[in-house]
Amino acid sequence: MNKRFVFINAILTFAVSFLVHNIYKWLPSVITTIFPVNESLFEHMKLIFISPIISSVIVYWFFRKKDKIINNYLFGLIVSIIFNIIIFYLVYLPVYYSVGQSMFMTLSIYFITIVMSNYLYYLIIEMKNNHKLNIISFFVIVVIGGILTYFTYNPIKIDFFRDPITKVYGIPK
């Protein structure tokens, strides 16, 4: 594995995010509620969660043949996702609440945090393989995905869960 992974996965994650952002709008169904269903800050957390999973699956197919086994792949994935969510909101929320929303600013912050989290991902997969961490990480991914989907159906009535455009919480009617 080399540092190309960081940039390839970062660019692919960024590109996949545009698709993930709109899947529910294009194909609204119970199945597609795992993707963002509105423009709330919470639903964008689902975008930050799901996009790297999709891009990592795609990148894995390209890198696995050359490198056979990629160490700590799932562990690195979940750590990098959690890191990305935390760093994105630590940077984005103060800017959002002080100057408002700007597409350029949001996308710039998002891309920078994707690159940072993919570098962390790379450092983890370069470490000695830990099979137990990968197994635990798989279940952590499933649990977090379940929690995020639960809150799509049962949003807390705070601004973080409210779509600023439609003023709706959760799935639009």
Image (cartoon, helix red, strand yellow):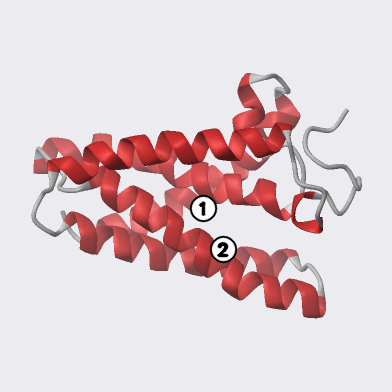
The residue drawn where x is 22% and y is 64% is: 123
Left or right of 102 in this view: 51 = left
Please identify, in this view, whether the residue under mark 2 or under mark 1 is nearer the observer.
2
Position of residue 12 measured from the top left corner of the image (x, y, whole percent)? 44, 48
Position of residue 139 measured from the top left corner of the image (x, y, whole percent)? 35, 35
Can you say whether 59 is above or below 83 in the image? above
Q: Secondary structure at mark 2?
A: helix
Position of residue 161 measured from the top left corner of the image (x, y, whole percent)? 76, 50
Res. 91 image quadrant: bottom right
Q: CA distance from mark 2 to mark 1?
A: 8 Å
Left or right of 15 in this view: 101 = right
Left or right of 9 in this view: 39 = right
| Residue under numbered circle 1 | 14
- Dot 2 or dot 1, earlier in sequence: 1
The residue drawn where x is 80% and y is 79% is: 99
Disc 2 to disc 1: CB gap under 8 Å: yes
Can you say whether 44 is above or below 144 in the image? below
Report if residue 150 is visible in the image: yes
Q: Secondary structure at mark 1?
A: helix
Report if residue 3 is visible in the image: no
| Residue under numbered circle 2 | 110
